[in-house]
Amino acid sequence: MRLKKLIAAIAVAGLVGLASKAWAATTDSMTVTVSVGGSLDILIDTTGDKSYEFGIVGVGLTTVSTRTIRVRNDSASLTEDWQLNCSTFATSGTGVDWNITTSLPSSNEFRMSAMLNPAQQAPGHADWDYLDNLTAYQNMNITTFGSGAEGANTNGDDVPASNTRDIWFKLETPSSSSDNDVKSITVTVQAASAGTF
């Protein structure tokens, strides 16, 4: 009988020992990575010919574009942040270039503003923001060039793949001009990685 009790006690102790080893655990971890295929891509003026002509405008006047310049996130899969840049109005002939300003334009100066909005807005609308060629690329977020909440179709922050936005331009002409040559400006929209601003 003692032998049976001894064997039973050894068996129970063995099972307890096995159970405690089964519950004792160690951990280890690993890193799993993935990247989204595709690249940043942008398409400007999907509704026109990649140009806009204000036409003949007098000096000291303000005019707003009469049609939108539609911009599309042409990436297959990436969300983008958009930025805007511009140059000085260069003359097409022998005349004088117009220089961009963020102040009220004087002789041979102009002020250009932009806004992302589905519809044309009045010149006095509060969401027009000046283009500034001294500030490399300006963010098109809810406070600059935007007219609505983040993620809405009224700003260039976190624009999903294949989505579009409409850019409108407001031009304020010089107080006087040295000539009547045609002037042209280059406006560039840059696609940056989401989270840039």
Image (cartoon, rainbow, N blue to C red):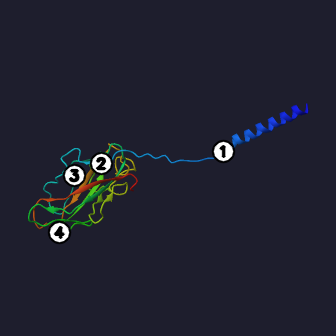
Q: Which residue is mark 3?
A: 65
Nearer the observer: mark 2 or 4; the answer is 2
Q: Which mark is residue 129?
A: none
Which residue occupies 69% across, 44% down?
Answer: 24
How far is mark 4 from mark 1, CA to CA?
80 Å
Secondary element at image label 1:
loop
Q: Amino acid at mark 4?
A: Ser
Q: Amino acid at mark 1?
A: Ala
Q: Amino acid at mark 3?
A: Ser
Q: x and y percent of residue 35 in the render?
A: 41, 46
Nearer the observer: mark 2 or 1; the answer is 1
Q: Earlier in the sequence, mark 2 or mark 4?
A: 2
Q: Which residue is mark 4?
A: 107
Q: Looking at this rendering, what residue extends furthest in the left direction?
A: 94
Q: Quadrant of the C terminus?
A: bottom left
Secondary element at image label 3:
loop
Q: Earlier in the sequence, mark 3 or mark 2?
A: 2
Number of numbered callouts drawn: 4
How far is mark 2 from mark 4, CA to CA?
38 Å
Q: x and y percent of residue 12 in the render?
A: 80, 36
Label pair 1/3, CB-CB below 8 angstroms: no
Q: Which residue is mark 1?
A: 25
Q: Amino acid at mark 2?
A: Asp
Crowding at dot 1, Cα within 10 Å, few <14 / some 14-19 / many 20+, comes out as: few
Crowding at dot 4, Cα within 10 Å, few <14 / some 14-19 / many 20+, comes out as: some
